Amino acid sequence: MGAGAKHRLVFVDRLLATLVHLRHATTHDVLACWFGVDRSTITRAIAEVRPLLAERGCTISPGVRLRTLAEVIDHLGTDGKTGIIDGTEIRVRRPAAGRKDRDKFISGKNKQNAVKTMVVTDGDGRMLFCSPTQHGSCADITHARQLGLVKLLADGPAVEILADAGYQGLGAQTGGRVITPPHRKFKKNAPD
């Protein structure tokens, strides 16, 4: 574009720039370069989008910045809050044909190429932690174990974590701190 040409960011780009800035502390200069706009455009976009996110409960408590899963568990234990964990899959392009771990990306549940991440929220639904991605073939419970959740809950503060059926078995390993629905074979006559 010629000199003086203005670039505008559509709402999705403004939202994406704001989320990248908040999640990764990416500077306005870097975001401006990525989106091909002036720094002031990014600054204005973030100033517009942050209040919209805050109105919908997407805020970070002042002074609280949780960077690791251990910090999240300590935070939940200190405040006596209930946590919620769940795994989510994101579809991705099929890896290149020569890649040796190509089959690991295929999700057993959806039979699609995906990456998986584990998310921890508080009882109000505020996201506290989002794990690094794992191949789509990795089970939710395996991912939680690899992240050290079992050790953190067993050795850490008394925290109640609600989870779906993908985490059955963690309750016994964490002293009952992870609560899952009963296994389908126990729906009628659940053990004590």
Image: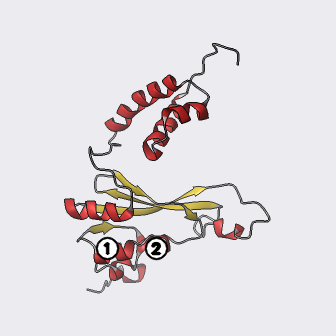
**Quadrant of the rendered image containing residue 69:** bottom left
| Residues packed near mark 1 inside 10 Å, few (<14), some (14 to 19) or many (20 plus) | many
Percent position of residue 180, x then y: 35, 72
| Residues packed near mark 2 inside 10 Å, few (<14), some (14 to 19) or many (20 plus) | many
Q: On screen, 50 above or below 61?
A: above
Q: On screen, 162 above or below 29?
A: below
- Please report the residue visible at 35 percent of the width from the left and 82 percent of the height from the top: 173
Of residues 120 and 91, the one drawn nearer to the viewer in this rendering: 120
Disc 1 marks which amino acid?
Leu
Of residues 171 and 5, the one drawn nearer to the viewer in this rendering: 5
- Location of the C terminus by quadrant is bottom left
**Quadrant of the rendered image containing residue 68:** bottom left
Percent position of residue 102, x then y: 71, 67
Give the farthest residue toward the top. 4
- For disc 1, the marked residue is 153
Tell me how far mark 2 sits from mark 1, CA to CA.
Answer: 14 Å
If you read the primary sequence from the N terminus, does the residue marked by circle 2 or circle 1 appear first? 2
Colouring style: secondary structure
**Quadrant of the rendered image containing residue 152:** bottom left
- For disc 2, the marked residue is 141
Labels 2, 1: front one: 1
Percent position of residue 100, x then y: 74, 70
Of the numbered discs in the image, which one, if any, rests on residue 76? none
Percent position of residue 156, x then y: 27, 73
